[in-house]
Image (cartoon, grey):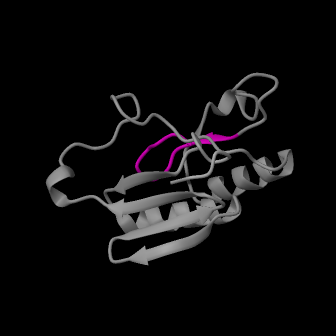
Amino acid sequence: MTSDSQSGLLHHVELYASDFDTSASFWGWLLGELGYDVYQDWDGGRSWKRGPTYIVLVQADETYLDEPYHRCRPGLNHLAFHAKSREQVNELTAELRERDAPILYEDDHPFAGGDDHYAVYFEDPERMKV
């Protein structure tokens, strides 16, 4: 049961990874930069929490690894987070480049979402758009 102030807010997102260690390293860094702390840790899984919301990462079972994730198939397309400033967007962009994370819409960066959206669009290790 939640309070009226939390009713309707996102509780958590659960992501499955084909390579848990690679994805956990990437998401651990990113979520740490966005103010999340490790919440739970178990064999093949980890969660990070900020306020009432948490994000879970789990190693996908081998049975389901035969078809890779693609954001244009039915299901989750992307996750979008607020940055605290343009400076944070710039810092994240530099770090993403150092990590060789694909930056999307590079020709229009950092205004790929329009003149009022200063952002970086990129892919996680599974090619999910963030």
- Residue interval drawn in magenta: 120-130
Relative to 115, 42 lies left or right: left
List the single residue furthest toward the left: 63
- Does 127 lie within the magenta span? yes
- Does 94 lie within the magenta span? no
Q: Position of residue 16 (x, y in %)?
A: 35, 54
User: Where on the picture, by quarter, is residue 115?
Assistant: top right
- Look at the picture and state if 16 lies above or below 74: below
Q: Residue at x 75, y 35 (%)?
A: 110
Relative to 27, 73 lies left or right: left
User: Where on the picture, by quarter, is residue 4?
Assistant: top right
List the single residue furthest toward the top: 114
Relative to 60, 36 lies left or right: right
Q: Residue at x 17, y 47 (%)?
A: 66
Nearest to the observer: residue 54 or residue 114: 54
User: Where on the picture, by quarter, is residue 61?
Assistant: bottom left
**Quarter holding the C terminus?**
top right
Q: Residue at x 70, y 26 (%)?
A: 113
Q: Position of residue 33 (x, y in %)?
A: 69, 62
What's the magenta bit mostly, secondary-structure-wise? loop
Relative to 14, 7 lies left or right: right
